[in-house]
Structures are given as C-alpha cells and as structure tokens.
Image (cartoon, rainbow, N blue to C red):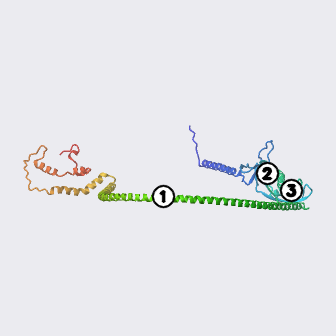
Amino acid sequence: MPNIMLSSPGMGSSLLVLICVIALLVLTTLIVIASRYRKCPSDKVMVIYGKVGNNSDGTSRSAKCIHGGAAFIWPVIQAVEFLDLTPMSINVDLRNALSKQNIRVDVPSRFTVGISTEAGVMQNAAERMLGLKLDDIQELAKDIIFGQLRLVVATMEIEEINNDRDKFLEAVSRNVETELKKIGLRLINVNVTDITDESGYIVALGKEAAAKAINDAKISVAQADREGAIGSANAERDQRINVSMANSEAIKGENEAKVQIAESEADRREREAEALKRATAAEKIQEAKALEEAYAAQKAAEMARASLEAATLEADIIVKAEIEKKELELKAEAEAEQIRRRAKGEADATLMKMQAEADGMRAILTKQAEGFAEMVKSAGGESNDAIRLMVADKLEELTKIQVEAVKNLKIDKVTVWDGGNAGADGKTATANFLSGMMKSIPPMNEMFDMAGMKLPEYLGTEKGTDAPGATE
C-alpha cells in the first residue's frame, strides 16, 4: 500500500516557527559579523590584541597593528583599540646644560612628534603606549628629549652649537629619533629658538663677530674708495687723450674737406660750361626739329580730321542700326517674358482649380464613406442591410425616373389585332406587345449593375436565377 502523509495545522505552525527561528539566527549572525568588522581611519592606528597569531620565531604576538585598512575582530578572543596619529608639539626649555667646554648653556626649543606608522615602530607604540592619555605620552616623550638634548650639548663646543646650527640640529634629530622609536614615536620637526649661556660667552662671540664684520666692511669701503679714485683719474686721462686725438682728426678732416670742396667747385664750373654749350646746340637742333614736327603734326591732324569725319558719319549709321536692332530684341524678349508669365499664371490657376475640385471630390467621397460606415454600423455590421436601406431611400426617385421615361410618349391610338392564338412561348400577341413596350424601359437590375451594386432580393430576381423546379 502507498504511504500517505497526513498533515495537520499544528505541524504547519511548527514548521513556520522553525523557519522564523532559523531566519532570525542567520540575521543575528550577519549583524554580529558586520559589527565585528572594523575599519581603521587614516589618522589612527588600529591595534588588535588578544590571540593574534605568532611571530616568525614562534613566540606569541602581543598585538597586530593596522593603518589604513580593515580587519575582522573575533569575538571573545580579540579586542581592538586605536592610537591617534595627531602630531604633538612639546616645549622643551633646557636650562644649564653642560657643554664640552664645561660652559652651561640654555637651549629653549620645541619638538613636534607623533606615533610612527612604520611596521616595527608601530608595534612598539602598541606595546608601550596603548591606553595612555595624550598628556602621559607627551611627558614620556619630553623626558626622552631632555636626556638626548643634554647628551648632544655635552658632545659639542659652544662655537659649533652657535655657528653650525645645522650640525647641531642634525645631531639632536638623530639621537632623539633613535630613542623615540623605541616607544613607537617619530620626530617630525625640531625648532631651536635661541641659545644663551650664563657666563656671556656666546654674547662675546657675537660681539667679536660683529666687530670683525664691521672692520671687514670698513676695509671693503676703503678699498672701494681707492679703486674709485684711481678709476676716476684713469678715466679723466683717457678722456683728455681721446679729446685731443679727436680734435686733431677733426682739423685734418676739415682741411681735406676744403681741398675736396675746391676741386669739386672747379669740376662744377667746367661741367656747367660744357653743359651750357651742349644746351645751346641742343636748343637749335630742337627748334628745327620742332618746326619739322609741327608741319608733320599739322598734316597728321588734317588726315585725322578727315578720318574722324568719315568715322563719325559711319558711326551714326551703324549706331542707329544697332540701337534699332537692340530695341527690337528687347521688345521681343519683353513680349516673350509676358507670354511666359501669362502661361505660367494660367497653368497655376488651372492647377489650383483642379486641386480644389479634387479636394472637394475627396471631401464628398470621404463624407459619403463615413456616412455609409455609420449606416453599416447602425445595421449591426451587415453591409447588405445598409445597401437595402439606401435603395429603399432612393426607390421613390428611381420609380419617378422610370415613369418620366414613358410619360411624354405621344401614343394617339393603340390598335391590337389579336386572334387569341398563343405563340411558341405560350403568350398571345397582345401580351408580347405589352411586354416589348415595357422592356423598352431600362431595367432596374441593369441600373444597379452599372452602379456596381446588386439588386436586393425583395425587389425580385431575374428569370434565369429562379429556384430550381419553379414553373412559369
């Protein structure tokens, strides 16, 4: 027999509760996981302590430091805290520090330090400063700086400290940086304001340096004055020599210029006399040539005047003919332009008339189509019923047209001689006569065919379309 599983409302409720509990557990797990995933800000060092693994030598690590990242903090076995990377400014007012010459000096200075982000140094900070307040960290760093600053002062002479300030600062930075790394700090900046001593040695060194500088300046001024006087005398000498040489050269140049002027004047006069002689001869020659050219010009003028009169006469005739020809061409062009514009206007008018007629016909046909569509819609979608309605509406007019066709026939007298005998078709002669006369009227069926429509059945059908078995 097949197994049949029976379910009850109680089992369904238990299953729903179980699903809800599982979903709640999954959601709670996800929330816990998300809350334990911690991100480290850029201005802090995240220190994870607890069970964080072993070192390379197999010993247990005390903490794991992360800067600029994120990590999952396991509950129960791990915890997390942060070290602030904000720089700390420490004022170190060193007094009575003994120098190498056993002279006590005062070195007021300011140090800027901060927690280092180097891997090993950051581990030292986690081990030695985690949980300390900012004031405690500053005091710890201040003690280290005081000791190293005294040590550096003790290894240097006053002259080195006062004159070679870069060497002093480099030594201080090197010693202080080394000691600060042991607790996880790094030196950012050192600023020594002023160095003094109680015996006045540094002041004396300053006075000595000032006096030496003043004396050097006086010597430099005297040397500059001497060199200036010598230079001025040399310049005056060179000036006088150059002026004398220039005057000599100027006089020599003036004399040479006067000689050249005299020679130029003689040449000028000689050339003027020669030019005058040539000019007189040329004038005589030119006068003769002028008379000859005048006679020739007069002759040419007479010939030109004769040619001008002939050309004027010829130009009058030709120009008049050209003007008449141009007038005829312009008149012909104007008439052609008028004809073209008139033809274009008539063509445009005809086109507009035909377009208007086409638009009117289109509108009529559109309205007829819309009316027929409404009639078909009113007839329940049956087009035949709509056609019957149209024919019934026009039946009176069609009948009137058929009656008008025979109304005006002039039949004075109709005489029918009928012997009463039936023909081959079973009809008498009178019947055939009346039938032929009625057939002369255009049948309605043909009218419907010409209109592209079919005669409704209730108006009758053709003889050839009667039902099979019907008799005449």
Determine the residue located farthest toward the top in the rendered image. 1
Left or right, residue 453 beside residue 44? left
Q: Position of residue 197 (x, y in %)?
A: 89, 61
The residue type indicated by label 3 comes to Ile
Q: Is residue 287 visible?
A: yes
Locate the N terminus by quadrant: top right
Callout 3 crowding tier (Cα within 10 Å): few <14, some 14–19, many ≥20: many
Comparing 25 with 257, the one in front is 257
The residue type indicated by label 1 comes to Ala
Tell me the tag on residue 281.
1
Left or right, residue 280 beside residue 335? right
Label pair 3/1, CB-CB below 8 angstroms: no
Determine the residue located farthest toward the right in the rendered image. 102
Choose the circle earlier in sequence order: 2 or 1: 2
Mark 3 element type: helix
Callout 2 crowding tier (Cα within 10 Å): few <14, some 14–19, many ≥20: many
